[in-house]
Amino acid sequence: MKDRRIVVALGRNAFGETFPEQQKNVKKAAESIADLVELKYQIVITHSNGPQVGMIQTAMTEFSRLDSRYTVAPMSLCGAMSQGYIGYDLQNAIRTELLNRGIFKPVSTIITQVRVDPFAKAFQHPSKVIGRVMSKEEADAEEEKGNHVVQESGGYRRIIASPRPIEIYEIDAITALLDAGQLVIAAGGGGIPVMEQGTTLKGASAVIEKDYTAAKLADMIDASHLLILTSREQLTSDDGKTLGNLTVDEAIKLIDEGHFDPITTLPKVDAGVSFVSAEKGRTAIITKLEEAYQGIKERTGTIIK
């Protein structure tokens, strides 16, 4: 285990939902990251792409409707686009913040592919809602293509699978950059989900839960810490109890008893448990973006050890 190596998972609150919001919010994220750099951690950052990947998918779908020469962009391509433009804003904001503190450290974004199981149950039970609101006729057309849709207030939306990550293909490049003293942004949005077909990697119509990929990434680089930054200083259970320090067994008990929201909170706790239980001496911390420094010092947050 690398004692000063950490994976930081940024939630959607670090970006906002529009281009101007993102450029403003990444400056706050950069400040928190720079605090960790000053503590001499080797850092890999992964991040949410929830609003962004849906925005890209919606835009490309509308473009294909306006011009018949173009096709709808597959989800894997939308994921790659989101990694690129979020990484661009984030790496520039971090670079600026570090230079303003007198620190020179290269920052690199890696377009990252993550293998998923084509036979995973998640493909039979899709759970991630994406894209624009559709009419009944448009929803029927999507279902004829083999896609899943769900009815919401105001219309219908597409819903896709969220399989678990199995392997990160660019892990050697990520590790090499870390060893060279660089700060790395990787596996954005949970990574681009791909399936192996011989020597070819084929994009999957899915979105991987980024917290599970963060745990997988932290395990594969042999990190000592997984820091999940969100909008709350500490998690609470469904009965309103604030959660501070937890053992793995205590966290598992809370999961088994159904104390966490399956969409927002459960993946964070489950990912933390997965990372910590894989090797002795590891720590997972879930806290507010602005409290990253206090979190890594274990002065605040939900801490799983």
Image (cartoon, rainbow, N blue to C red):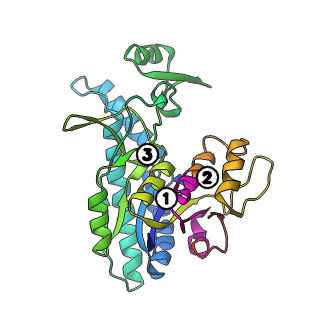
Residue 268 at x, y percent in the picture: 58, 52
What residue type is disc 1 on?
Ala
Q: Secondary structure at mark 2?
A: helix
Vertical side of 178 occupied by 242: above or below:
above
CA distance separating discs 1 and 2: 13 Å
In this view of the protein, which residue sits in the foreground, 121 or 150? Answer: 121
Circle nearer the N terminus (1, 2): 1
What residue type is disc 3 on?
Gln
> In the rendered structure, which segment of residues is drawn in magenta?
271-295
CA distance separating discs 1 and 3: 16 Å
Residue drawn at x 42%, y 53% as measured from the top left: 19
**Residue 298 placement, left or right of 78:** right
What residue type is disc 2 on?
Val
Please tell me how many numbered marks the rendered image carries: 3
In this view of the protein, which residue sits in the foreground, 16 or 267? Answer: 267
Residue 213 at x, y percent in the picture: 44, 50
Number of other residues with Cα within 10 Å of mark 3, as a class: few under 14, some 14 to 19, many 20 or more: many
Q: Secondary structure at mark 1?
A: strand
Residue drawn at x 51%, y 59% as measured from the top left: 14
Vertical side of 294 occupied by 123: above or below:
above
Question: What's the mark number on residue 269?
Answer: 2
**Label pair 1/3, CB-CB below 8 angstroms:** no
**Residue 80 placement, left or right of 152:** left
Q: Which residue is mark 3?
A: 52
Q: Which residue is mark 1?
A: 9
Number of other residues with Cα within 10 Å of mark 2, as a class: few under 14, some 14 to 19, many 20 or more: many
**Residue 35 placement, left or right of 239:** left
Q: Nearer the observer, disc 1 or disc 2?
A: 2
Q: Residue furthest left?
A: 199
CA distance separating discs 2 and 3: 24 Å
Circle nearer the N terminus (2, 3): 3
